Image: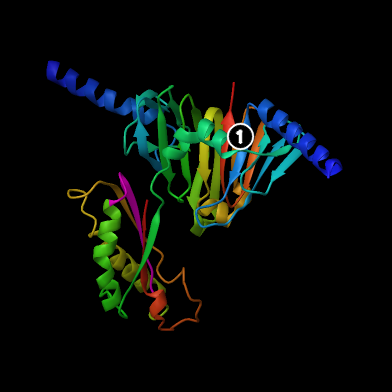
Amino acid sequence: MKRLFACCSLGLALCIPNAVSADETVIGYIKTINDQTTIDESNGPIKASLGSPIHVGNVIKTDQNGAAGVTLKDNTILSIGPNTEFKIEAYQFEPQQDKLQLNASLLKGTLHYISGVIAKLKPEAVTVKTPTGVIAVRGTRFLVKVEE
Amino acid sequence: MKTISLPKTLTFAVALALSGCAKSYLVLLEDHDGSTGKVIFSDAGSETVVEQAGFGAALDNSKTVFKVEQEKINKDFGRALASEPVLPETFLLYFETGGTKLTADSAALIPKIIEAAGKHPAADISVIGHTDTVGDASKNEKLANERAVQVSKLFDAGKMDVKEVAVTSHGEKNLLIKTGDETSEPRNRRVEVTIR
């Protein structure tokens, strides 16, 4: 009986994160990282490390020593500096089905952006929101800083 | 001479004052391939376009575009710039007709691809198989997949730092060189490897 209970609770524990998570599709990976960087998953923040997967809805956060770089599936490159909060709001990369979208938000801090295939195929599908407005890109590389 | 230099100084002073004020701002950079695109910042009703590398705009409705000194870029964005991942690399491998045998040239490229994969920490690799239009579409879908699967075996997660190898088949639907049906085209018989 005890064993059965243990099995059940284990099953439950394994199930919960899956049930809560909205979209499990991996859209990119952490490729560079130093010091304290976390990723807010739907079931709470986790400490990020080299190779951590990135999902839609994730907020990548760094503290005053943190910095991280991410490469998305369409070769978009995003790297952030210290004291930064960066969220992937929406992402679709299925060129065969013409499903292309990248919407991100820089809530605070610094971002270095290099466009990938989505921006090449469908420039209007890429936006980076900031607290005061929206940045649109036409095939390019830029930096943005949001000070609170 | 003085009449020219005065406005110049003034413009410089205004630009300096503006860029000094801009707490939240963006800077357009030249791409790694030497090209420069543009960025457009818009908030309710106003739009600011930056088209010149090294120039920036405040993230407000002032619609001012100003030069950003390299020193300021380094100071504000040094850490973000230093965290840039290794740029993705793409390789094309070509096949003999009707099967999964690589051409001699492509077979010779394999060591270079494996070496490249080793230079991408936490590499995620996509392998997309293609065929030309010889044979029926469903058979080509299968053949393209076989080609991609074969190439994907080069990347051994046990030996290298590889997070993911994604294999996809586009069959004969994504021709590099547009041809009619039943056309043998060596450049369409390929596998595209992207190492991120």
**Mark 1 lies on residue:** A129
Front residue of B173/B192: it is B192
Query: Can see residue B16?
Result: yes
| Apparent side of residue B65 relative to residue B74 in the rendered image (left or right) | right
Snapshot quadrant of residue A68: top left
Residue farthest to the bottom, as pictured: B183
Query: Can see residue A26?
Result: no
Q: How is the image coloured?
A: rainbow
Chain for mark 1? A
Which residue range is magenta in the image? B119-131
Residue B31 drawn above or below residue A61:
below
User: Residue A23, percent across and down?
Assistant: 43, 37
Residue farthest to the top, as pictured: A2
Q: Is residue B127 magenta?
A: yes
Q: Is residue B188 magenta?
A: no
User: Residue B126, percent across and down?
Assistant: 36, 55
Residue B118 drawn above or below residue A7:
below
User: Residue A73, percent across and down?
Assistant: 43, 49
- Quadrant containing the N terminus of chain A in the rendered view: top left
Amino acid at the residue labelled 1: Lys
Instruction: Please tell me how many numbered marks the rendered image carries.
Output: 1
Q: Residue at x 40, y 27 (%)?
A: A66
Residue farthest to the front, as pictured: B1
Q: Residue at x 72, y 28 (%)?
A: B17
Residue B173 drawn above or below residue A9:
below
Q: Residue at x 41, y 51 (%)?
A: B87
User: Residue B98, percent across and down?
Assistant: 31, 79
- Quadrant containing the C terminus of chain A in the rendered view: top right
Other-residue count near label 1 (Cα within 10 Å), few / some / many at <14 / 14–19 / ≥20: many
Front residue of B133/A116: it is A116
| Apparent side of residue A63 relative to residue A90 in the rendered image (left or right) | left
Residue A141 drawn above or below residue A55:
below
